[in-house]
Image (tube, rainbow, N blue to C red):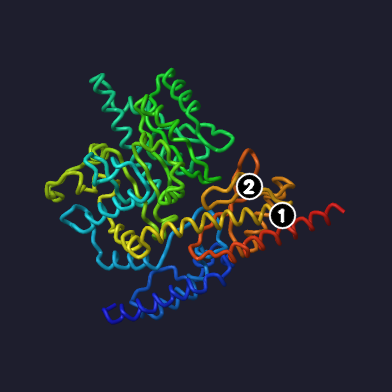
Amino acid sequence: MDSQQFREFGKAAIDYIADYYDNVKTQRVLPSVQPGFLISQLPENAPEGPENWREVFQDFRELIAPGATQWHSPQFHGYYPCGTSFASIIGSLLTNGLGNVGLTWVASPACTELEVVTMNWLGKLLGLPEEFLNCSRGPGGGVILGSATEAMFVCMLAAKSKMFHSLRKLDDNLDEHQTKTKFVAYTSNQSNAAVEKCGILGSMKMRLLKSDSNGRLRGDTLRCAFEEDKANGLVPCFVVATLGTTGICAFDPLYELGPICKEYNVWMHVDAAYAGAGFICPENRYLMQGMEYADSFDVNVHKWLLVNLDCSALWVRNGYDLIRTFDVQRVYLDDVNMDLRIPDYRHWQMPLGRQFRSLKLWTVMKIYGAEGLRKHIRSQINYAKYLAKLVRSDERFVVDPEPSMGLVCIRLVEGDKMTKKLLNNLVESRQTFMVGAYHRNRLVIRVAICSQLTTKTDVENSWAIIRNEASKLIMSDISDKY
């Protein structure tokens, strides 16, 4: 493909994307396909010779696109938002066009320095303590990784290394392997599955501690777990506190957990993958009370801040904790001598290579501004409140618990069995998509406001779909009884 063909294909692709977002509201959320639909239509072997871009684009439109779930439909309410915007798409295009690999500062100076700038910008917008920023006088700073899982894993490994070196200062004869087998990590039983996965990957025992009736991990529970494990010869090492759990968007009280972690010299990582974005609005920051005790904090910018996957923002109190854990030197990676204000980011992550992710974050922050991002967050929170108001007007439904950020959890008064049937029928209709969760041992249907295109009318349409499916289900149930 030469530059002229690239221009033609690129313009056609941009037109397709623009049309897609203009018309996504008219598409069914879930595709009408069965497992294996695409495998059966594509050749078993790669093409031997080149194909014209028009043929490639035709295959995309006719074979691949019909099998895509419409994540950006206003009737998509599953999981949490998957960020996108025209600004981010342009940023991604420029990133891919430059094709830089930010191994070191000299490998792409702009890649490193724009990341420093944008992470400082975003950290200030979120109201993070100054010591987490690159622009502070301390060793803290931010880095963009691929996911909240990756950020959590990086911090877990750093916590293991830090704890071992701390213990070895007391006993120089400690065996590293044997000692690390005694390390324990802790989190709420309401935390994301990714936390448990990190424990598996990091070879660290992960204890899922019981949350309270509101889905929060409390300080007394954590302290009891620490004391129990210490009595059994184990070493508390790492805690993952969640701000915005996946199930019901509950917030662990950092002001309770933090002082305990500090007392026991345990690393506290704050996973705010979804809800952390809400802290750009000052009225939500009471939910992060106790952040001054955290060792690390992560938010998936690619969830709620209009930036495309993948872009996960991690801040650490002490960048040297990461460097001491991941620093591996080679002569071909020699770089200019710098301090943490211009980090050598290859020591802050697992891979060696780095994408120019900050470019799409930069384009979004420039195009929307802080005011535009706050407007987006506030509008989605208000739509969630409006949906809850509509649900409460129907005596067949219960809103439980109270809406949190952009999430509303609902259930039928008739119980779990009927709520489960309703959820299944909603998904099978392909007009919308939602997933379930449990709250106080009751099944609830999670209705997350996800699409950046959502309007008040779209919320009303979603509620109409839910209400109509409930009416059909209840009528069918009555008929079966008689």
Expressed as whole percent of the image width and height from the top left, the position of residue 199 reads 42, 37
Question: Which quarter of the rendered picture does the C terminus lie within?
Answer: bottom right
Say which residue label 2 marks.
Answer: 444
Question: Which of the two residues, 130 or 305, is positioned nearer the viewer here?
Answer: 130
Instruction: Write the residue at 27% across / 68% down.
Output: 97
Instruction: Write the residue at 35% across / 76% down.
Output: 10
302 over 134 or under it: above or below: below
The answer to whether residue 253 shows anywhere in this view is yes
Q: Residues within 10 Å of mark 2 (few under 14, many from 20)?
A: many
Expressed as whole percent of the image width and height from the top left, the position of residue 123 reads 33, 48
Q: Secondary structure at mark 2?
A: strand
Question: Could you tell whether 52 is left or right of 112 in the image?
Answer: right
Q: Quadrant of residue 1?
A: bottom left
Q: Residues within 10 Å of mark 1 (few under 14, many from 20)?
A: few
Spatial CA span between label 1 and label 2: 16 Å
246 over 363 or under it: above or below: above
Say which residue label 1 marks.
Answer: 394
383 over 62 or under it: above or below: above
Q: Secondary structure at mark 1?
A: loop
Expressed as whole percent of the image width and height from the top left, the position of residue 477 reads 79, 54
Expressed as whole percent of the image width and height from the top left, the position of residue 325 reads 26, 37
Instruction: Write the residue at 51% across / 46% down.
Output: 246
The answer to whether residue 205 shows anywhere in this view is no
Mark 1 / mark 2, whichever is N-terminal: 1
Instruction: Write the residue at 33% across / 52% down.
Output: 122
59 over 424 or under it: above or below: below
Question: Could you tell whether 180 is left or right of 412 in the image?
Answer: left
What amino acid is labelled 2 in the image?
Val
Q: Disc 1 vs disc 2: which is toward the camera?
A: 1
